[in-house]
Image (cartoon, rainbow, N blue to C red):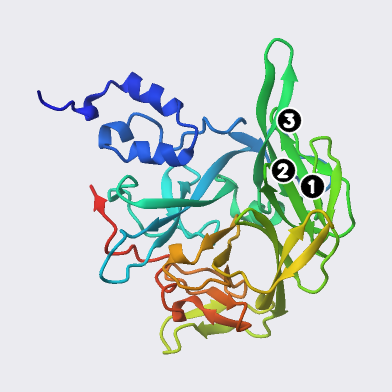
Amino acid sequence: MAPPDWSQLHRDILQHISKTLNSEFYQIRFRSVCSSWRSSIPKNHHHHLNLPLKFPIPSDDDSNSNSNSNFHLSKRNVFLITPPPNQKQTLHPWLIKIGPDSKQQTHLWHPLSRDKKLPFHFHDVIDFNQHRVIHLGTEFVFGDLPSSLYRNNIEKIVVFDADTWHIGKGKVSYSVLLTIHVSGKLAICRCGDERWTVIPGMATPYDDVCVFNGRPFAVDSNGQTVAVGLDLSLEFVAEPVFGGNKKFLVESNGELLLVDKYMISVQHEGFLDDHGDGVGNYEIGFGRKRAVKFDVFRLDSMRKKWVEVRNLKDRVLVLGEGCAFSVLALDLGMKNGNCVIYKDEAFRHVHVTGLGVRVFCLDKHRISPLVDVPHYNKLFWPPPEWLKLRW
């Protein structure tokens, strides 16, 4: 008896199967099976989001935005595609971000940038069923929002789930958006809201938001950290950490970390040679800030304190514009971790090759261009030769 031809499954059956997949990663693997399976469901399937696809944007004052000014909310995922095991030669992984643009067309994006596309054409298909793929993080963006509005109105967006009780339906889950308002305060938008609600709070502006263990957290520029309630309450989580200029929240190996970034202003305009060979200079801007060092802390929830971490051991922290995440050094093909990869804000743009991206080593207290660090210099581009692509 001939084996069944699974590519000929009826479209209705394929769509029913896809609706049972509660992970976007499984959705991607489902679409990787064959062209007929790939075409059976939309490229950007949002069944996992318990929220409408269009939301208002926060206004530029403490009032709330016009409900008629709605924009599409898109989800992008960061994946690490690792090479086949037991190879005679050292093969390096590929770090990618995949998700829709303003026209809901799927693209690869630079993992550290919100708007930098990679020159990868999707007539070449990445077969996610043939490789070990690690999901590292998620980024939410208003895909069709003009860049000028994004710069002025929107910081990082996080989405978390909440439950409510309805008579006759029991517990119903829905999703909530949290961001940092242009005023520096927190702003929240719940499913069904026509406007964002600005949360009254501390005078110090907030630097970052994240979701940790299903709860939304926010940290201000002094390091004081709060958990955000659906009733707009702010629960004190950790006392301030003074010193740096910019705070980031990162989940790493089951712990919540605070990364404190120290910066100085760039006093000239021109080009910076990342390669050291006079080729590939990259534009930097006057008045922009560049990092000079980082401190890392872990949350001690019992003592409500941030405790300094001097060694990340086998972990590497990656700080992007829309999401921050942690990854095992071994998965990056490295023996040791204990470093932070980040986009240097002194550069006007980030380049596909890694120009404008830096690596800070905690043990050496040294910053190096990504392109000068072995094993990292091809982390973003080009696609590795071992990666199997098919039409």
- Residue highlighted by disc 1: 227
**Residue sitting at 71 percent across and 80 percent down?**
264
Percent of width and height locating residue 328: 51, 62
Q: Nearer the viewer, residue 194 or 253?
A: 253
* Rendered residue at 51%/68% (across/down): 350
Q: Residue 356: image x %, image y %?
A: 53, 74
Circle 3 sits in a helix, a strand or a loop, which is it? loop
**83 in relation to 33, above or below:** below
Q: Secondary structure at mark 1?
A: strand
What kind of element bears circle 2?
A: strand
Q: Nearer the viewer, mark 2 or mark 3?
A: 2
Give the crowd class for mark 1: few <14, some 14-19, many >=20 residues within 10 Å: many
Residue that carries the numbered disc 3 in the rendered image: 193
Toward the left, the furthest residue is 1
Q: Which residue is mark 2?
A: 215
Give the x, y percent position of residue 74.
54, 42
Looking at the image, the residue that sits furthest to the bottom is 277
Q: How far apart are the alpha carbons under marks 3 and 1?
A: 21 Å
